[in-house]
Amino acid sequence: MASAQNIHSAAGHSTAAEAFSAAWLCADQNYHVLLSYLICSRHFAPGKARKILENFFADQFVRDKFQADSRRAGVCFRILIRESLELYLFEKQYETPSGQHFQPLDNLPSDPFFDRQWAREIIRETMRRVRNICVSEGGPELFECLLDDLSNRSYQDRPGELSLRTRYRNSEKIKQYLIQQLEALLMSTISDPRLVMQEWQALHQILPEDITLDPEILTQHFLSSQDMGAFWLELQSETIPGLGRTFRDLIQGPETTLAELQKTRQIIKLQNPGNTLPPELLAAMLYTCLAVELLKFNASLSESQLQTLPRSLFWLSKQQWLDPQTRKLAVQAEEKIQHLTASG
């Protein structure tokens, strides 16, 4: 957030940032939110609004109140700062542009304009910080990946020649940066770290149209069926480490051995330490290996596998982004388990 310390004179009262309370610093960092609130919601002229804020930040009572409230648990500075500003307008007998004095307000209702401006400033500053991180790491490509993700742009429609695995890894990486910076910023707007998710959800309710504030969108990764299908085809053409054969060749090749399939499953389970693959794709690869083991080698199944594998194979058979041959393998393997179960 752009600090207002070079705009109003309050910062001149101290040269050390530590002299200011957390709430005061939060208000200072959101100076332009307060200014737009006074101008657009309270209808003060711009010059008058700036003078009010200059006096507000310099007022010792305000500073003491912020100091005390910053130490209290459960305080949301977004609410505290606006309440303090409204109280200041009343106590200093400021007049509205229509000539009326501000009235004391008990249980001050929320102001949609103020809250939305606050939420937008949180987003703007978060994105600025994330962009700076991306630039420091060597270029804007990672940040462009975030913009594509937030606009729900298909991987296949994005420019460049990166593999889908690389695109997915970049998406996971940049979303972690976004979450970290958003949480760090929200931490500066509350007195209790335990309120981070509560304030995050509150801002999402204030500005529901901006998916940057949607916890579900940021903590999960949704790929279109089109992207999943392309990703699956890409994985089939990749060489399995240590085996020198592609996944497609292992699944479809007549010379594939049971040991190779079992080793492939072990390799797949170790594939995702850095979230380089969607979990659904990993599951599909594992279940496909098990289906081939069962159909081609009559692999024995444990009691727990007899109970759980049919559900997994049923799921596999219903994924429309898979190729028809893989879905057919899943159906055949599920039918074989049913036959084994029925025959005892």
Image (tube, rainbow, N blue to C red):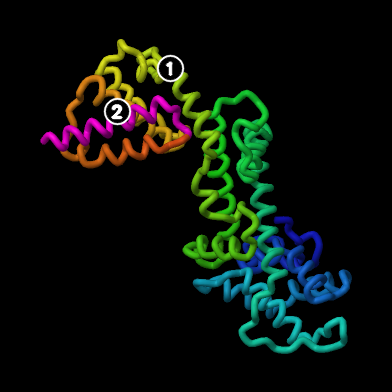
Position of 212 with respect to 316 (left or right) is right
* Figure quadrant of the N terminus: bottom right
Q: What residue is shown at x 40% (from left), y 25% (from top)?
A: 325
User: How far separated are the C-alphas under marks 1 and 2?
Assistant: 20 Å
Q: Find out whether residue 333 is within the magenta segment.
A: yes
- Please name which of the two marks, 1 or 2, marks the residue nearer to the observer: 2
**Between residues 135 and 92, which one lies in front from this camera angle?**
135
**Residue kind at label 1, given as amino acid type:** Thr
Task: Identify whether 147 is placed above or below 50.
Answer: above
The magenta stretch is: 321-344
**Residue kind at label 2, given as amino acid type:** Ala
Q: In the rendered image, which residue does mark 2 sit on?
A: 291
* Figure quadrant of the C terminus: top left
| Residue 266 in sight in this render | no
Q: In the rendered image, which residue does mark 1 sit on?
A: 239
Mark positioned earlier in the residue sequence (1 or 2):
1
- Where is residue 282? Give x, y as percent: 40, 33
Crowding at dot 2, Cα within 10 Å, few <14 / some 14-19 / many 20+, comes out as many
Task: Identify whether 26 is placed above or below 43.
Answer: above
